[in-house]
Image: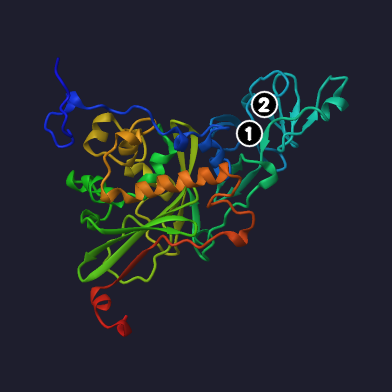
Amino acid sequence: MTQKPDANIGGMPFSGYYRDIPKTPDMFLCSVRRGTPGGEYLRRFWHPVAYESELGNVPLRVRALGEDLVVFRNGRGEIGALFLNCNHRNSSLEFGIVEERGLRCCYHGRLMATDGRVLEFPGEPQADRLRDLVSQGAYPTHVFGGIVFIYMGPPDRRPVFPMYDRLTLPGIELVPGVRLPLDCNWIQLKENTLDPAHTAVLHVIPQLRGMDHFAGEFEAFPEIIWTETPGGLIYLAARRVEGHVWVRSAETLGATIHCISSIFESGRVEKRATPPFMTFWTLPVDDDKSVNFFISHVSPGEPMPFDKRRALEIFGQYEDRPYADRQWIPGDHDAMVSQGPINVHAAEFLGQMDRGVGMFRRFVRKGIETVQAGGDPIGFYLDQSEVPATFANDSIMKESAIAGDPGDR
């Protein structure tokens, strides 16, 4: 019988035969369903479920945090998010009739308000009694930037929708994007934000294949630091470009928000701080499925090299390209989804460039433990005055100013 070597096989060539590959993901972090550690943590935040443009004459079926729902706008313009199945006989409300006051079940006609109250029980002799006994499961909604958000946590502690400073800058147009579905756990999407090393490899492949993509300056590996912010985590990646030092940053806020700077910046013109580029909200659909929603921040007079409403289609954020094309020029989507439906952290061998990944996992773990202890995690705010500042931007300065006398800076 062939024996496994006693020595560490880490650097051994052709070591596949001896390797034990962990197969169990960390569900303490990755679970999204109600009652699980991760699911209860996620239920302390607002989550995107639809773009306003998706709400029409019929209800929209959606899935969020492992629950099936319908989202609709009634004739008064009020938006509701209800459990998918009618409280009467469990028929799906995706076939319901949108009316002035609410959503009527197609089967026996019960009319549900946007808050889940049953307004009408057609033909029911005990309607008055049932009205006090029966309701449809419902969640509060909020609309911002053309996106419909819902809060699925304890109703007696509903947080404010956090209006971060980057969302309220004067003169900046907020342009809603499109759905970006990914067949993987939500944490894989957020970790990508705190992994600036991948921009010097993954996002340079298109240039190597003769395709315009990120600015060519991304090819240089940056000097990177990661740190906590009042609202989450941030990296700062510094590159030297023709006598300038260009510091790029990206930031996560709470559990599921991330903000990025322009992918077209080349670092050649002095700038104290650039305006926001894109802000993303990730919806954990199931343990193994997610959807990114986003808005673009458009400055007055900003050149539009692409349609920002469909911006990320050209950046490998979809699986709509042929497999051969995705192999030839892979994008973020391919890198993240190929980690598996739920990435097994125990099977990874991380290095110094992965410090942001480790920080995010610790951030989520601490948030989960805080909720388990009855506290409020970072990203949960009961009053707008509690919402902290954000910091993601590009800053570009002359190298001589940094090296010179502090009084010259």
- The numbered disc on residue 327 is none
The spot of residue 311 in percent (x, y) is 39, 47
Q: Secondary structure at mark 1?
A: loop
Whether 283 is drawn above or below 84: the answer is below
Decide: few, some or many residues near mark 1? Use Cα within 10 Å; few <14, some 14-19, many ≥20. few
The spot of residue 152 in percent (x, y) is 61, 39
Determine the residue located farthest toward the left in the rendered image. Answer: 13
Mark whose residue sits in front, 1 or 2: 2
Whether 401 is drawn above or below 278: the answer is below
Q: What amino acid type is highlighted by mark number 1?
A: Asn
Image quadrant holding the C terminus, namely: bottom left
Image quadrant where residue 105 sits: top right
Residue at 27% x, 78% y: name it.
401
Return the residue at label 1: 57
**Nearer to me, 1 or 350:** 1
Instruction: Indicate left or right for 317 with 292 as reference.
Output: left
Q: Is residue 49 visible?
A: no
**Nearer to me, 362 or 198:** 362
**Nearer to me, 325 or 159:** 159
Return the residue at label 2: 96
Image quadrant where residue 121 sits: top right
Image quadrant holding the N terminus, namely: top left
Residue at 54% x, 49% y: name it.
377
Label 1, label 2: how many angstroms apart (C-alpha)? 10 Å
The spot of residue 282 in percent (x, y) is 47, 43
